[in-house]
Image (tube, grey):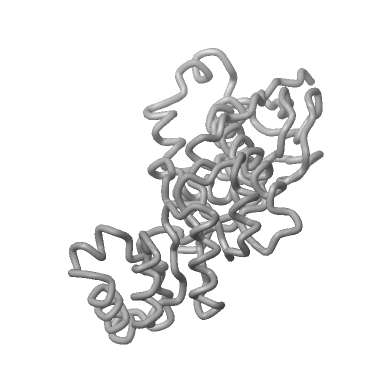
């Protein structure tokens, strides 16, 4: 399933959740033939995200809408600006309103926070990754918002990368056994998929270096000083990712080590939704 197919499925399910057997508020008070216009008003500074999604939502309900974009995804937004204008049946506007706002407010909040993190990485080799700490059934758009904010998407789910974390390693019987099994699995079942393995200390790093068969080493809950020691040992043989306890106050210290990636779940689960509104324009 490609991105647009996945987005359409999300929209279909979300509209069904909201509308149920009918938008009785609109059905009871507005003629089904009535046409209208509405604008998306910005009420808070930040990074705008979800304009493409909003258009897709409206067109899912009514393909022949007129959708005029004034600000695009990734643009800085200021209080009082208008992001877009939509002309459609009033029923379409009112039935899509809450879904559009829920998506755009959440996405803009994530994009805004992500931008704050990526600004801290300017001038460094290190790139920002998101995680799977997402809202069930909304991961597609949360990760899209991270991308809009300048971050990189880690794996989308359990299906597009092997990540051997502490529990996998412990259940498998150790780093070497976990890597060996994963490597053989890839050869038989999933050629081309990458392997990342979590390490909890420098001894773990040494085990991975000795055994090989991984593409990236995660340095979990390492301090910046420990990261430097690990990178000296790794010496460019594997991609590296720092994870755990990284925030806006210390991300620059981690970037200064030269680690390839930092993963920060907070860009999604700590983001606060932006203040936006969809207002009718009388015509």
The image shows residue 174 at horizontal and vertical percentages of 23, 70
Identify which residue, 171 or 7, lies in the foreground. Answer: 171
Task: Please report the residue visible at 68 percent of the width from the left and 41 percent of the height from the top.
Answer: 116
Using the image, determine if residue 165 lies above or below residue 16: below
Total count of labels? 0
Asked whether, in this view, residue 16 is left or right of residue 179, the answer is right
Task: Please report the residue visible at 61 percent of the width from the left and 35 percent of the height from the top.
Answer: 109
Q: Examine the rendering and report whether any part of residue 63 can be seen.
A: no
Q: Examine the rendering and report whether any part of residue 126 can be seen.
A: yes
Q: Name the quadrant containing residue 135.
A: top left
Q: Quadrant of the C terminus?
A: top right
The image shows residue 198 at horizontal and vertical percentages of 37, 63
Q: Quadrant of the N terminus?
A: bottom left
Using the image, determine if residue 194 lies above or below residue 65: below
Asked whether, in this view, residue 169 is left or right of residue 81, the answer is left
Task: Please report the residue visible at 33 percent of the width from the left and 66 percent of the height from the top.
Answer: 164
Using the image, determine if residue 180 lies above or below residue 114: below
Q: Of all residues shown, which one is farthest toward the bottom?
A: 187
Identify which residue, 115 or 90, lies in the foreground. Answer: 115
The image shows residue 60 at horizontal and vertical percentages of 56, 44
Q: Of all residues shown, which one is farthest toward the top?
A: 29
Identify which residue, 266 or 206, lies in the foreground. Answer: 206
Task: Please report the residue visible at 63 percent of the width from the left and 26 percent of the height from the top.
Answer: 90
Identify which residue, 239 or 225, lies in the foreground. Answer: 225
The image shows residue 22 at horizontal and vertical percentages of 42, 26
Using the image, determine if residue 263 lies above or below residue 101: below
């Amino acid at each position: 399933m490609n991105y647009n197919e996945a987005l359409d499925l999300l929209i279909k399910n979300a509209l069904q959740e909201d509308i149920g057997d009918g938008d009785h508020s609109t059905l009871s008070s507005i003629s089904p033939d009535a046409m209208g216009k509405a604008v998306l008003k910005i009420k808070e500074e930040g990074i705008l995200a979800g304009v493409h999604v909003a258009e897709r939502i409206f067109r899912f309900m009514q393909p022949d809408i007129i959708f005029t974009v004034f600000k695009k995804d990734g643009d800085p937004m200021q209080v009082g600006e208008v992001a877009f204008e939509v002309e459609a049946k009033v029923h379409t506007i009112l039935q899509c309103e809450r879904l559009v706002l829920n998506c755009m407010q959440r996405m803009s909040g994530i994009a805004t926070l992500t931008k704050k993190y990526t600004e801290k990485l300017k001038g460094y080799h290190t790139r920002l990754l998101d995680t799977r700490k997402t809202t069930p059934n909304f991961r597609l758009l949360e990760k899209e918002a991270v991308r809009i904010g300048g971050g990189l998407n880690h794996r989308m789910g359990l299906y597009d990368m092997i990540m051997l974390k502490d529990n996998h390693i412990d259940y498998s019987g150790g780093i070497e056994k976990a890597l060996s099994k994963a490597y053989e699995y890839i050869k038989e079942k999933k050629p081309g998929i990458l392997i990342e393995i979590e390490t909890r200390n420098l001894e773990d790093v040494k085990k991975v270096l000795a055994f090989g068969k991984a593409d990236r080493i995660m340095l979990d809950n390492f301090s910046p000083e420990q990261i430097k020691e690990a990178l000296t040992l790794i010496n460019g043989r594997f991609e590296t990712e720092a994870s755990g306890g990284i925030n806006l106050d210390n991300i620059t210290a981690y970037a200064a080590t030269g680690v390839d990636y930092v993963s920060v779940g907070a860009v999604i689960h700590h983001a606060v939704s932006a203040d936006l509104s969809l207002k009718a324009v009388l015509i």
